[in-house]
């Protein structure tokens, strides 16, 4: 069967993370510059070879001060480690039709660790211009300290400023490369 290449549709895709702040509210951030490359056999995503990368300097939480801190050596160290990456190893069905688990390795700074994400396959369809599109929703959770993102501050009343757990969320739309 022929190999099919799929390219990211950035206008219809987003990668976000959510982390508890002061253990009472959730802060949402996103990577504005990222890419996904996918190759499949035909339109069968169970055979997919998947790679993801994001520019760490593109992190955006809506606060310039916080974004600067996230780009610093306390977190992503964007100057020395401009890209974080995920390389998929296996996509396997999980329970209900259209639900999968995607396992692979996430690299942040120089640390690579296994990660498993939940994936909902939204389906394949044609847009009004004749392009074939495929849609996916991703979710998962990591412990940021597993990648050396250790900065924190103790709160006077107990607890810490930033949770160790980080929820990952993605809406990905791919376009079949002609």
Image: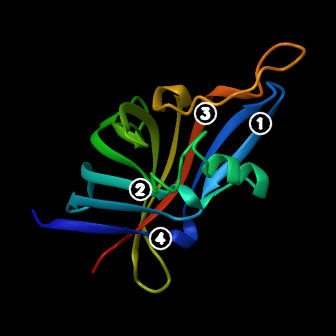
Return the residue nearer the eye: 161 or 81. 81
Rendering coords of residue 67 (x, y %): 70, 53
Q: Outermost residue toward the bottom?
A: 129
Q: Secondary structure under badge 3?
A: strand
Q: Nearer the viewer, residue 116 or 72?
A: 72
Distance, label 4 to label 1, CA atoms, is 28 Å
Mark 4 neighbour class, 10 Å CA radius: few under 14, some 14 to 19, many 20 or more: some
Quarter of the rendering occupied by the C terminus? bottom left
Q: Which of the two discs, 1 and 3, labels the residue nearer the N terminus?
A: 1
Cα separation, mark 1 vs mark 3, equals 10 Å
Left or right relative to 152: residue 143 = left
The mark that comes first in sequence, 4 or 3, is: 4
Q: What element carries label 4?
A: loop
Mark 2–mark 4 Cα distance, whole angstroms, equals 14 Å
Where does residue 47 sit, x and y in percent of width and height?
21, 49
Query: Distance between the Cα atoms at labels 3 and 2?
Result: 18 Å
Q: Please name the residue that numbered disc 1 is placed on.
A: 26
Quarter where residue 88 is shown: top left
Where, by quadrant of the figure, is residue 111 drawn?
top left
Q: Do the residues labelled 1 and 3 touch (CB within 8 Å)?
A: no
**Quadrant of the image containing the N terminus:** bottom left
- The label on residue 166 is 3
Residue 137 shows up from this direction: yes
Name the residue beneath numbered marker 4.
9
The relative height of residue 28 versus residue 145 in the rendered view (above or below) is below
Taking the image as shown, residue 42 lies to the left or right of residue 34, namely left
- Tell which circle, 2 or 4, labels the residue nearer the N-terminal end: 4
Q: Which colour scheme is used?
A: rainbow
Decide which of 121, 169 is in the foreground and name it: 169
């Amino acid at each position: 069967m022929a190999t099919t290449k799929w390219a990211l549709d950035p206008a219809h895709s987003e990668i976000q993370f959510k982390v508890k702040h002061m253990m009472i509210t959730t802060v949402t951030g996103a990577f504005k510059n990222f890419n996904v490359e996918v190759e499949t056999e035909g339109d069968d995503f169970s055979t997919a070879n998947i790679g993801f990368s994001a520019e760490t300097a593109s992190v955006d939480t809506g606060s310039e001060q916080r974004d600067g801190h996230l780009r610093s050596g306390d977190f992503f160290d964007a100057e020395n480690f401009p890209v974080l990456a995920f390389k998929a190893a296996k996509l396997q069905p999980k329970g209900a039709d259209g639900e999968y688990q995607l396992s692979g390795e996430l690299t942040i700074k120089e640390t690579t660790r296994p990660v498993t994400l939940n994936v909902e396959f939204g389906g394949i369809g044609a847009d009004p211009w004749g392009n074939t599109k495929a849609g996916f929703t991703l979710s998962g959770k990591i412990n940021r300290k597993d990648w050396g993102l250790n900065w924190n501050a103790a709160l006077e009343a107990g607890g810490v400023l930033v949770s160790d757990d980080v929820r990952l969320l993605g809406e990905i739309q791919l376009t079949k490369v002609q």
